[in-house]
Image (spheres, rainbow, N blue to C red):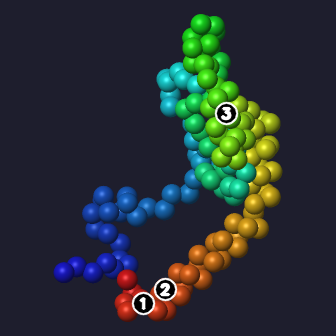
Amino acid sequence: MSVATEEKPRSKRGQRARETLVLDAIDQIRMVPAGVTGSWAYYLRPDGATIRDALVINPNGGIPDIENLAMRARYGTGASDFRRKEERKGHVFLGSTLTPEGVGKLVRSMGDNREDEILWCQEQIADTELDIANSDRPEI
């Protein structure tokens, strides 16, 4: 039976799996799949404290910015219904594309939630330390 150790994996696959990725802010933003036309929309989850928590991309609710008016109308059908559905969840519609105004709302919202996120992280650390202290095998 093998026990997990802290030593570096010998296989390249194992090394890649344990790599620490440091993402820039732009890399954390979910994007519309390349080459896909649809009614994608960005929403703000007001209780989110990180980009990944606060910025939601949904395949419904937007109206694509395309020249063909018939296709734009087709993809935009029901957009208001989808927006209302997201609003019932507490999400705020930002637009079909991420605009400077939308990014501003995102940054302000994350700033408003920063202190609570810090408290949550501290709670998670305390819970983990408690688990380690009360574990039969703390090395694992």
Task: Name the one closer to the observer, 12 or 18.
Answer: 18
Residue count near mark 1 (Cα–Cα under 10 Å), binned few <14, some 14–19, many ≥20? few
Image vertical order of residue 138 relative to residue 110, above or below = below
Residue drawn at point x = 60 percent, y = 83 percent: 126
Task: Name the one closer to the observer, 125 or 4.
Answer: 125
Residue drawn at point x = 37 percent, y = 58 percent: 16
Residue drawn at point x = 78 percent, y = 35 percent: 100
Q: Is residue 132 left or right of residue 104?
A: left
> How many numbered callouts?
3
The part of the image, by quadrant, that contains residue 127 is bottom right
Q: Say what secondary structure mark 3 lies in.
A: helix
The spot of residue 137 in percent (x, y) is 37, 90
Q: Are marks 3 and 1 in contact (CB under 8 Å)?
A: no
Q: Is residue 33 left or right of residue 116?
A: left
Q: Which mark is residue 1?
A: none
The part of the image, by quadrant, that contains residue 103 is top right
Q: Amino acid at mark 3?
A: Arg
Disc number lying in front (3 or 1): 3
Residue count near mark 3 (Cα–Cα under 10 Å), binned few <14, some 14–19, many ≥20? many
Find disc 1 in the rendering and name its residue: 135
Residue drawn at point x = 57 percent, y = 18 percent: 75
Position of the C terminus by quadrant: bottom left
Q: Are marks 1 and 2 in contact (CB under 8 Å)?
A: yes
Q: Which mark is residue 83?
A: 3
Q: State which tag comes first along the sequence, 3 or 1.
A: 3
The spot of residue 13 in percent (x, y) is 30, 58
Find disc 2 in the rendering and name its residue: 131
Q: Is residue 98 visible?
A: no
Q: CA distance from mark 3 to mark 1?
A: 47 Å
Q: Say what secondary structure mark 1 lies in.
A: loop
Image vertical order of residue 43 relative to residue 65, above or below = below
Disc number lying in front (2 or 3): 3
